Structure formats: C-alpha cells, structure tokens
Amino acid sequence: MKTLKKLIMISLFLSLFSVANSASVEKKPDDYMPALNDVTDLKSLQRGARNFFNYCAGCHSLKYVRYNQMAKDIGISEEELNSYLIFTDSAPQDVISVNMLEEDGNRWFGKAPPDLSMITRVNSNTHIYNFLRSFYPEKGSPTGTNNRVKDGTSMPNVLSVLQDEMNKKEFDSFVLDIVNFLDYAGEPIKAKRKSLGIWVMCFLFVFLIFSFALYKDIWKEVK
C-alpha cells in the first residue's frame, strides 16, 4: 500500500513538472489565432507547396511523401513539378528529401532541422501556424531572432523578408497556406477520408430509415 502511494506521488510530481516545463517553453502570445485551414482547398495547397519548397525545403524534408503523388493529389502538372518544385537532383518518384547532411545541420543550428512529414500530427495546426507567425528580432540570439511561442528556438526566421514586405493579413494567409500543405503531408488521404465519411453517414441514415420501417412492419404483424 505504501509503495502504491509512493508511485502515485511520484507520478503526480512528474506530471506537474512536465506541465510546468512545457509552460515555460511554449507560450501563447496576444495574437494567438486558430489555424482555420482546409485541406480540400486545392488552390491553397498549391500555394502552400510553392511556399514550402521555396522557403522550407532547403532544410526540411517530407520523407513520407513522394513528389509525383503530391503533385497528383493537389493538381500540379508534371511539368510544373519539375520546373518549380524540385530543386535537387531527385526524380518525381522519389520522396521529398534535402541535400543537407545531418552533421551540418547539427553544426549550423545546434540540432539538425527535423523532417516535417508528421509535424501537424505531433503538434497541432494551430501551434505550427502561430509558431511561424511569432518570430521577433532579438540581440544576442545565435540567429538574431527568437519566437514568442517557442522561446529559444534554434530555427531562424526564414520568412523575415516577407514579414517586412507583406501586410499582416497577407503574411498570415501565406503562413496558413504552408500549414495547410503540411496538414496534407501529414495525412494525404484526409480530404478523401472526409468526403467518404459524408457518403457513409448518408448511407447509414438511409439504412436506418429502411431498418425502422422494416421494424415497424414486422411488429405490426406480431401485434
């Protein structure tokens, strides 16, 4: 019994420590906003792919996504794929990788940039959206910037030029398209699953009507 109480107290202490530690690293700035992205919006996914490959793909891979499958899913032609999205020596059938070596990433950033295939599954879309919106200049930081959502991040603000050139609404829309594309990358069949789910619910509803009518007819005879 005493051992059980000790285990409960230790678990409670570790849980409280974990919550306190998370709160000290991840914050919610005043302009924290929900990411209302839509993976069925092909235009947004196409813009998000363009934004990702121009600003993110130099450091981050999508190792569970193939170029040609991605292009097919979001309505990009093979010519556009080869001309505007593949910047390495990869072939269309290859997975989306980077040329950066892990040891170089560790040396330059302190930690190699992670693969982003499942980033919206590990973290929420809203977290990624606000993280990308929350960089600010900070003297003394190795990258010259810091982040209001994740303090002490080793990631530089690769979108700083766009923040200066765009107004807030334009920049937020630009970032939301990236998040939408990453949401697709985390679950490429999400849009199809949602569409299929609607048809399944319609079928079950119709089946329920027929089942109820059959039930009433059978019990009418019994009575």
Image (cartoon, helix red, strand yellow):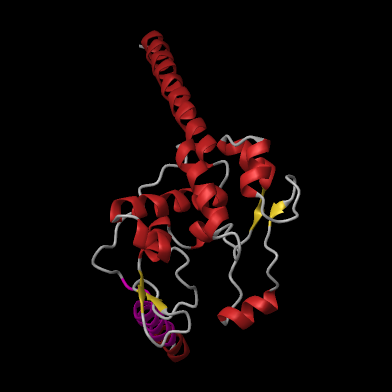
Q: Residue at x 68, y 42 (%)?
A: 68
- Camera-side residue of 202 and 138: 138
Instruction: Residue 54 in the image: state x and y as whole percent.
Output: 55, 55
Extreme residue toward the top, this view: 221
Residue 221 is covered by the magenta coloring: no
- Camera-side residue of 202 and 21: 21
In-image side of 49 versus 92 (left or right)? left
Instruction: Residue 140 in the image: state x and y as whole percent.
Output: 41, 88
Q: How many marks?
A: 0
Placement of the N terminus among the 4 image quadrants: bottom left
Residue 208 position (above or below residue 164): above
Extreme residue toward the front, this view: 165
Q: Residue at x 46, y 48 (%)?
A: 180
Q: Residue at x 48, y 84 (%)?
A: 142
- Camera-side residue of 6 and 206: 206
Instruction: Residue 154 in the image: state x and y as whole percent.
Output: 49, 78
Residue 25 is covered by the magenta coloring: yes
Q: Residue at x 23, y 67 (%)?
A: 30
Give the prevailing secondary structure in the magenta stretch.
Answer: helix
**Among the 4 quarters of the image, the one containing residue 188:** top right
Q: Which stretch did the figure color magenta?
A: 10-27
Instruction: Residue 21 in the image: state x and y as whole percent.
Output: 39, 82
In-image side of 137 versus 80 (left or right)? left
Residue 12 position (above or below residue 123): below
Placement of the C terminus among the 4 image quadrants: top left
